[in-house]
Image (tube, rainbow, N blue to C red):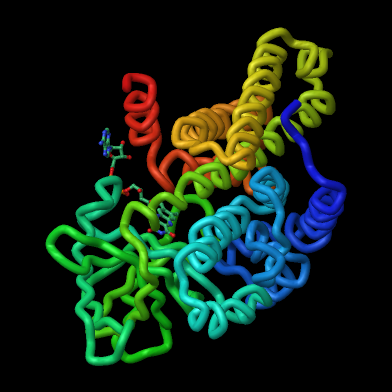
Amino acid sequence: MFLNLESEELAFIETVKKFVAEEVLPNTRAWEEATAFPDDIWTKMGAIGLLGMTLPKEKGGIGCSTMAYVEACRELAKGDPALSMNVAAVNALCVAHFDHFATPEQCEKYLPGILKGEIKLAWGLTEPDAGSDARRVRTKAEPTDEAGKYKINGRKMFITNGGKADLIVLIARTSETELSAFLMETNQPGFKLEKRIHTVGVSASNTVQFALNDAIGWHTPCTFEQAIGLLYRGRLGIAGMAVGIAEKAYELMLEYSKGREQFNRRLCDMQSVQNMIADSAMEVEAARLLLHKGATYMDRGFHVVLESSFAKLYASETANRVTNRAIQVHGGRGMTREFLVEKLWRDAKLTEIGEGCSEIQRLVIAKQVLK
Ligand SMILES: Cc1cc2nc3c(=O)[nH]c(=O)nc-3n(C[C@H](O)[C@H](O)[C@H](O)COP(=O)(O)OP(=O)(O)OC[C@H]3O[C@@H](n4cnc5c(N)ncnc54)[C@H](O)[C@@H]3O)c2cc1C
């Protein structure tokens, strides 16, 4: 209903679907086992435009709409949710940060390599004592004698792709009351990887904790609110990821229920199973509509605070419910690694936590509807 893509964007989504079918889905288990993506996945994604989706063409991106961006996240999640999460964050939080806040000199130095997948990115906000309460960030940035360069000290945790990143867009405190964002190269003495964080799902995404001891960051002039404002598109990307997970689980649930018989009947002919299928069909549809509404509103220039939280909250809870039902319909086999549904169920959990947990989304919604 809301899906309204230009012909160039439709062609882009077809390319993404082909990429998912050929390069992503066949490797998703291996990447999970390796707890890493191969490095060349970034250059392959760069080649088809996945690393600069909403970046304007004149800056080297493909200049697509938010709708095309969420559709790409949705398609990627059907192949590998962890990859979808990485791509969502790289585009909405990192590349968009360059687009809005980086200086021409910073763009010139890094963007070409980023868009080709040669410079790998991460976005660093969360700290051991600053999660949902992002304003608690303690990592401290102090100016050096060199213009724009700051000395940064602190610790970040749960940073997606942090173990592989060459460059991190990092949030740090510049005074008692102010926070801002910095570009930090990881190949420097002050940057120390402390540990790899192993998570129950999205394991290929190389989540880490790192410490900064007089690490040098390059200031991108923006306020905390401006940097964090990018999360509205980010949340739509995570909602796209959640819808993709739910769609894939629903598809696998349908297929399995048609192929297995018990009591001389196919599972799909049993009313209890049909209830699970019906509820999933409806919830997937509703989640997709909220996603498309949020993307449409953003493309029309509205401030999508409410819509992005609606989409993320509903889609992430749908992904968790539908993957759970998909396992139920698969019975014991659903709990084994021979079937993809258990992986989708584990991967789905992240969508209720990352980029603002469900409780925070409810707070945002309540604040909007009560004002
Ligand atoms: C796999 C993974 C990847 C991630 N990637 C990144 C990344 O790339 N960059 C980055 O900066 N961060 C990243 N994060 C961090 C993520 O954004 C945080 O985990 C999330 O914001 C929640 O913060 P927290 O884990 O500290 O939980 P806390 O803030 O400690 O919250 C714990 C729980 O308390 C409840 N809660 C908290 N606040 C409230 C409230 N106000 N009202 C009601 N209930 C509340 C919620 O149930 C919440 O789940 C990632 C996390 C994971 C798991």
Quadrant the N terminus occupies: top right
Placement of 187 over or under 333, stated as above or below? below
Viewer can see residue 318: yes
Residue at the extreme top:
271
Placement of 173 over or under 354, stated as above or below? below
Location of residue 140 by image quarter: bottom left
Percent position (x, y) of residue 74? 68, 44
- Write the residue at 46% across / 31% down: 306
- Write the residue at 70% across / 30% down: 250
Percent position (x, y) of residue 31? 63, 64
Location of residue 99 by image quarter: bottom right
Q: Nearer the viewer, residue 116 or 282?
A: 116
Q: Is residue 254 left or right of residue 187?
A: right
Residue at the extreme left:
176
Percent position (x, y) of residue 63? 70, 59
Percent position (x, y) of residue 206? 49, 66
Q: Nearer the viewer, residue 294 or 148?
A: 148
Placement of 39 over or under 68, stated as above or below? below
Location of residue 41 by image quarter: bottom right
- Write the residue at 47% across / 68% down: 122
Q: Nearer the viewer, residue 211 or 54?
A: 54
- Write the residue at 22% across / 82% down: 143
Placement of 173 over or under 29, stated as above or below? below
Viewer can see residue 335: no
